[in-house]
Image (cartoon, grey):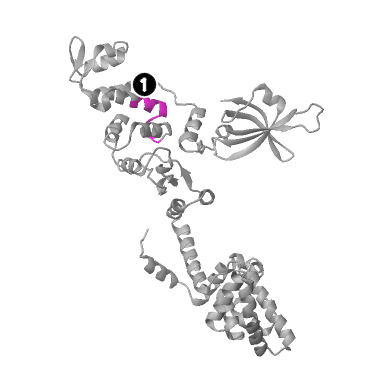
Amino acid sequence: METYDNADFAFNTLKKFDTKSIEDMSLVMAMIRPSGASYRDSLSKHIVNHNPSPIIDELLRDNLGYLVYQEDVIKFLTDICGLSGSEADNTRRAIGRKDAERLQNALPNILEGYCNVSDKPREVAEEEAKIFLKIIEDASSYMFGLNHSIAYCMLGYVCAYLRHYYPYEFLTAFLNCSETESDISNGTALSKLLNISIVEPKFRYGKSEYSSDTSTKSIYKGMQSIKFLNKNCADELYNLRDFPYNTFIDLLYDIKNTSTNSRQLNILIRLDFFSEYGNSKELLKITEMFDYFKQGDAKSMKKEKIDNDQILYSIIQRNSVESNKSFLKLQTYNILKECEEYLRCQNIQDFSYKDKILTQLEFLGYINMCTHSEDENERRKLVVLNVRPIMDNYSKIKGKVWKYNIKTQSIGSGKQGVFYMPSELFDQEPIGQYDIIFAEHVYQNKGYWNIGSYHHI
């Protein structure tokens, strides 16, 4: 992406537009503020507004007769009502702040000035002036100044430009600048619109903050959002991204030289951060072996410690000098490599879906169990987020449950949904929060989705 100095970028962008284009964009930007609520639909349709008098229509000619900018208020009070610039600005402030006393003090001068300009009888002119002041009051909840609006419209254009031509960079910057859950929710919605996946951080991709990778069409979440992790840990692991580690043991040797502690490493393994090297349970076994040999620094080992493990005994025996009671001069690196090969041959099964969900809730604060699969069977695997009984208000049996409202999240698609289930079916195999079920049969009834049969996974 080409970089610009802020001032140069703004200037080069501004040169692309003629004055009329900028005015139109500014008008749109101003009318979407709260002060434009009453007229924005009409203005957007280019419907001309007719004010109490031709004098005011002429004043607002460039805005199709609508009161849009703070400068319009100032111009009315100075050019038509004869107030000085400071008096006009003070009056504008009084209107905006609903300061009745200050407005009442200014009203005689406003009415006198307007009546002097108007060709209508005084009583009519006074009513016109009061009507327009009411319009100003109604529009003053949040009104843009022209210069403010132009700055915002140019900023809006730049954002639209970046969103269109650099969607990954734009969305990444937006998420990194987000301050509320609503911001994150809006960013997530935009990612779906742009077909960009927001995924958990992975080794070689995860940074301390959100980061993008166009080759995978993904934005990776920041590692700092993970409980107990920090910027130093994230940055140091990211700096290892270009090394071609052939085994997990090779990677562990380099991780040992970072500030990553055992708890942080364990959390990352449990969250599948190192999934390119195997499943979580397998990698934890390899890590345990690495720690057992003092993270590759063990020099000797008493035989009695490993008498019950003939495989490990044989591996160490091949890579050490043997005495009566100990193995000496351990070739620890070779031992660990053989141990990793042996563990990988054991077909160690990964943690269950439910274990992974509980890990995510503990360290991420939310569930992100999604395989992004198009397979219907994978999409029918549902995480139960909430179960709510629905009472039968017409039954003679007080408190009888009629059916259950079950909120779920698909493991295949990641989408959340709500299903209903008859109490008779639920009672045969009860469902609890964070259970994983396979929806064998689903159907619609009166617009609602129902589960007809299922089983636990």
Q: Which residue is mark 1?
A: 345
- Residue 152 horizontal/vertical position (percent): 50, 67
The image quadrant where one finds the C terminus is top right
Any part of residue 65 in sight = no
Q: Is residue 231 visible?
A: yes
Whole-percent x and y of residue 259?
A: 30, 38
Report the magenta residues as a range: 273-287
Residue 442 vs 57, above or below: the answer is above
For the N terminus, which image quadrant?
bottom left
Q: Position of residue 349 (x, y in %)?
A: 44, 23
Residue type for callout 1: Cys
Residue appearing at x 30%, y 12% in the figure: 310
Q: Is residue 11 above or below residue 370?
A: below
Which residue is drawn at the image coordinates 37% and 27% (left, top)?
284
Q: Is residue 278 magenta?
A: yes
Q: Secondary structure at mark 1?
A: loop
Side of 305 relative to 109 (left or right): left
Q: Position of residue 300 (x, y in %)?
A: 21, 19
- Would you say residue 202 sits in the magenta stretch? no
